[in-house]
């Protein structure tokens, strides 16, 4: 019974590993992202792997050949056999592909007045109102403290938008 497994690949030898696994008869799935960035003022599109250093392979009969393919460090095991990746997970990843690449949804934009939750620090879990962006990835929020509104500055990574 065929099943999907996961292989850990050597850094810098991903293409070699994918090619050698294909030559050995394995169907290989290495999902990639579509990421839009700016470089020197120009918009560019890069395609990094969804799971850097890993690829999925369909095991039909023997899996041992995959373990010794050039560029493969190891197969992810469950005891002494490859861990099975459910078909539903592979199907769900493939459904998100557009022209062979996956586009992730953008995180919700921070707008003045948006409700945010504090993720770490002494106010962890408290809800606040987004007030403004500050330099160096800092944000200013309005926090209800001691019966009044206080302005607090935090790192942008320390808050999340509440929907």
Image (tube, rainbow, N blue to C red):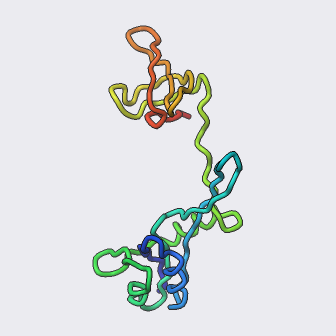
**Residue shown at 51%/27% (left/top)?**
139
Q: 99 or 53: which is nearer to us?
A: 53
Query: Residue at the location (56% across, 34% down)?
Result: 163
- The image position of residue 133, as x and y in percent, is 56, 27
Q: What residue lies at 59% left-to-right and 32% top-to-bottom?
A: 110
Expressed as whole percent of the image width and height from the top left, the position of residue 141 reads 50, 22
Q: How many marks?
A: 0
In the picture shown, does residue 155 fall above or below 43? above
Residue 82 image position (x, y, % from top left): 37, 79
Residue 131 relative to residue 144: left or right = right
Residue with the most extreme top position:
147
Q: Is residue 159 above or below residue 150?
A: below
Q: Nearer the viewer, residue 91 or 67?
A: 67
Name the outermost residue toward the left.
79
Q: Quadrant of residue 53?
A: bottom left
Furthest-front residue in view?
40
Give the residue at x 45% y 91%.
61
Q: Quadrant of residue 130?
A: top right
Tell me if 157 is positioned left or right of 99 in this view: left
Residue 153: x and y in percent read 45, 23
Q: Is residue 81 above or below residue 143?
A: below
């Amino acid at each position: 019974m065929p099943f999907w497994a996961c292989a850990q690949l050597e850094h810098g030898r991903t293409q070699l590993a994918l090619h050698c696994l294909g030559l050995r008869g394995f169907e290989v799935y290495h999902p990639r992202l579509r990421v839009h960035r700016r470089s020197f003022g120009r918009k560019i599109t890069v395609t990094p792997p969804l799971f850097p250093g890993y690829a999925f392979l369909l095991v039909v009969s023997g899996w041992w050949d995959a373990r010794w393919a050039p560029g493969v460090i190891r197969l992810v095991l469950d005891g002494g056999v490859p861990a099975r990746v459910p078909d539903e997970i592979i199907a769900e990843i493939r459904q998100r592909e557009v022209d062979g690449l996956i586009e992730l949804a953008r995180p919700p934009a921070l707008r003045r007045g948006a409700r945010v939750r504090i993720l770490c620090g002494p106010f962890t879990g408290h809800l606040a109102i987004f007030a403004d962006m500050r330099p160096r990835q800092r944000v200013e929020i309005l926090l209800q403290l001691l019966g009044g509104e206080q302005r607090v500055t935090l790192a942008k990574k320390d808050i999340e938008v509440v929907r």
